Image (cartoon, rainbow, N blue to C red):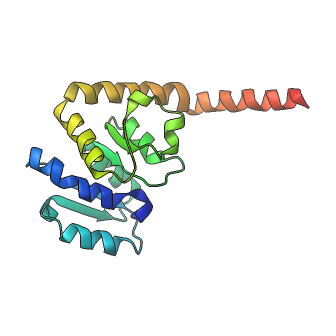
């Protein structure tokens, strides 16, 4: 969703540092339309890199995932994020992730499965993205770690077994 809580303005603010180091890089923002998108579009239009920032609104989910698969790095610079299923989607699609410490999914993911930065810190976001763009081996290691984490902790079979254990323990306590 294109909303202020997703930290998209922070992402746009991080772009000059990245764009200066990687002059052929393009930046993609995708999500459902909200009233906030007007503010974001204005911020993008004022950027010196506006021709390299692409805003896709209301894409069907499969097209959004296809776009994600084309990415070198995925960022989720949220100010508030209860879980962030999109992190799992990036992980499943083998796209390395930079996210803020706010993302609830970090409670179940391995810390080295993604780059973690403070919320509302464009310099830290840019530094983390640059580190991944400059280090393909690190990107590969991160996506392998994320894939293993998803497989071991978040596949439906594992989730079922965990819930089943919790339910049995609760019943045993009664």
Does 159 sit left or right of 79 as displayed?
right
Number of marks present in the image shown: 0
Does 133 sit left or right of 38 as displayed?
left
Q: Is residue 141 above or below residue 42?
A: above
Residue at the spot x=58%, y=33% of the render?
A: 156
Asked whether the viewer can see residue 11, the reply is: yes
Counting from the top left corner in percent of width and height, residue 38 is at: 32, 75
Q: Is residue 143 above or below residue 44?
A: above
Counting from the top left corner in percent of width and height, residue 103 is at: 48, 45
Counting from the top left corner in percent of width and height, residue 94 is at: 33, 34
Asked whether the viewer can see residue 72, the reply is: no
Which quadrant, please, contains the N terminus? bottom left
Q: Is residue 48 above or below residue 103?
A: below
Residue at the spot x=17%, y=65% of the render?
A: 47
Which quadrant, please, contains the C terminus? top right
Residue extending furthest toward the left:
23
């Amino acid at each position: 969703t294109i909303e202020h809580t997703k930290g998209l303005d922070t992402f746009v603010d991080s772009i000059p540092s990245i764009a200066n180091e990687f002059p052929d890089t393009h930046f993609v923002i995708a999500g459902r339309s909200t009233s906030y998108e007007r503010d974001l579009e204005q911020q993008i239009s004022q950027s010196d890199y506006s021709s390299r920032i692409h805003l896709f609104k209301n894409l069907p989910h499969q097209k959004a995932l296809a776009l994600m698969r084309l990415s070198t790095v995925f960022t989720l610079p949220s100010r508030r994020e209860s879980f962030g299923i999109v992190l799992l989607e990036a992980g499943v699609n083998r796209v390395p992730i930079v996210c803020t410490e706010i993302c609830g999914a970090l409670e179940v993911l391995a810390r080295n499965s993604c780059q973690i930065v403070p919320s509302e810190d464009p310099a830290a976001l840019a530094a983390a993205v640059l580190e991944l763009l400059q280090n393909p081996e690190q990107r590969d290691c991160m996506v392998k770690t994320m894939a293993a984490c998803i497989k071991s902790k978040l596949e439906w079979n594992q989730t079922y077994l965990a819930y089943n254990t919790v339910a049995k323990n609760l019943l045993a306590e009664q």
